[in-house]
Image (cartoon, grey):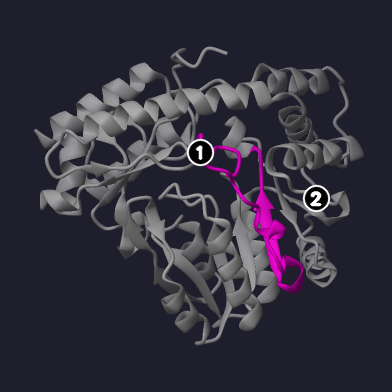
């Protein structure tokens, strides 16, 4: 494991390194982009664990790629991983496979709501939580989180007021993206009780569950008191943990038999229901043999976080708090007095750095930037210097 290794990802059809040029040209009118450093999308610049590569190569050695299914051994690997790392016992029969967490979110919304129904999310939050419902002609109800020294906290009074308006589905981000908060047992208990009280389906996105720093522990929503009395669908995946987003694979965990049957019917109606044979091999290898790599990656990224927090907090008007989880850092520049438009121009044109503007995560994100630190330390130092240059 060499997390310091630099890999040239240009011209590999990389969304992060290649396609971002089209995005900034169209949105920010920046055309000369070859020397801009991309630290935006949640995609690591680390080589994946060799155990995953080896598993895929082993399957490639067999010359036939016919119809396949996910083996019991793969399901057992998933079960054992979450039992060991998260004290969560998953019954394999409650697992439904999908091509990704975002497609899974779309499937849940399509299955349990109708056009015009209200979908709620606490902002700032991952854009798919509002873009997917809007694309399906649902009404998005946002309820802002409250910024604090730990990142964010819930305003449960405001959330209950939102639920009273007839919300059908609440989408939870746990751990939170972009704020990096690991929600507490108490927070999750309150949320589950509210969902029970107002008959709201709780869709818990836990894709970042494995990337949690020392002093914090991810609590799966389905392990919370009275979870069995609520309507809960949890989405999980190894794709963020092991940098295999390009290998489309995710799971929905659905203990509620009624919910599971409806989701199964929807998947069948769209000709879905399994992941491909290479994805299955990757998932199994990640969960069976990837733990050592993951633990080392978390420590390396934690060190990156410490460096960036120390350096950026030296800049007037910039406030950065180390997140509890994820490899994404949420930078507060609201005290600089710089508008988002001006900030993005400074970063892209002067600093030659591409990071995410806060309003991508809804209006509650205005005054913030999201930066991806899952990359070699040399890249991190370069990004910090570019950020300093942009604000100099």
Q: Residue, x 83% and y 17% (percent of image)?
A: 61
Residue marked by disc 1: 215
Horizontally, residue 351 falls left or right of residue 115, namely left
Where residue 274 appears, as percent x and y from the top left, is 80, 48
- 108 relative to 162, above or below: above
Q: Quadrant of residue 280?
A: top right
Where residue 179 appears, as percent x and y from the top left, is 40, 50
Q: What are the residue bounds of the magenta stretch?
A: 209-238
From the image, which quarter does the C terminus lie in? top left
Residue marked by disc 2: 90
- Which element carries disc 1, helix, strand or loop? loop
Mark 1 residue crowding within 10 angstroms, few (<14) / some (14–19) / many (20+) = few
Horizontally, residue 171 falls left or right of residue 146, namely right
- 185 relative to 316, above or below: below
Label 2 – label 1 distance at C-alpha: 25 Å
Q: Residue, x 17% and y 35% (percent of image)?
A: 349
From the image, which quarter does the N terminus lie in? top right
Q: Is residue 137 at all visible to an observer of this figure? A: yes
Count of residue discs: 2
């Amino acid at each position: 494991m060499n997390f310091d290794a630099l890999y040239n990802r240009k011209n590999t059809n990389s969304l992060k390194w290649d396609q971002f040029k089209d995005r900034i040209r169209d949105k920010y009118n920046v055309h000369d982009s070859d020397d801009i450093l991309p630290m935006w999308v949640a995609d690591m610049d680390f080589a994946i664990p060799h155990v995953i590569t080896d598993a895929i190569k082993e399957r490639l050695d067999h010359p036939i790629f016919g119809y396949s299914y996910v083996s019991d051994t793969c399901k057992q690997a998933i079960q054992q991983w979450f039992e060991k790392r998260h004290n969560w016992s998953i019954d394999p029969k409650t697992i439904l496979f999908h091509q990704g967490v975002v497609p899974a979110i779309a499937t849940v919304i399509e299955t349990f709501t109708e056009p015009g129904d209200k979908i709620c999310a606490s902002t700032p939050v991952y854009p798919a939580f509002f873009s997917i419902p809007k694309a399906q002609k649902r009404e998005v109800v946002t309820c802002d989180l409250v910024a604090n020294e730990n990142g964010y906290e819930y305003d449960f009074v405001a959330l209950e007021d939102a639920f009273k308006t007839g919300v059908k589905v609440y989408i939870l981000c746990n751990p939170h993206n972009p704020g990096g908060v690991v929600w507490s047992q108490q927070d999750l208990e309150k949320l589950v009780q509210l969902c029970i009280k107002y008959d709201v389906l709780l869709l818990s996105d836990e894709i970042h569950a494995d990337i949690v720093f020392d002093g914090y522990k991810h609590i799966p929503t389905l392990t919370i008191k009275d979870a069995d009395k609520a309507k809960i669908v949890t989405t999980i995946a190894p794709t963020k943990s092991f940098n295999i987003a390009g290998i489309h694979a995710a799971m929905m965990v659905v203990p509620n038999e009624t919910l599971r049957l409806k989701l199964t019917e929807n998947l069948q109606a769209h000709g879905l229901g399994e992941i491909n044979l290479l994805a299955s091999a990757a998932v199994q290898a990640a969960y069976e043999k990837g733990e050592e790599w993951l633990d080392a990656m978390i420590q390396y990224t934690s060190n990156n976080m410490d460096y960036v927090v120390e350096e950026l907090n030296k800049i007037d008007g910039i406030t950065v708090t180390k997140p509890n989880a994820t490899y994404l850092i949420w930078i507060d520049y609201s005290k600089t007095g710089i508008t988002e438009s001006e900030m993005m121009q400074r970063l892209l044109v002067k600093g030659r750095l591409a990071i995410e503007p806060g309003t991508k995560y809804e209006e509650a994100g205005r005054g913030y930037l999201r930066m991806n630190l899952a990359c070699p330390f040399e890249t991190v130092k370069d990004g910090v210097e570019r950020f300093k240059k942009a604000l100099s």
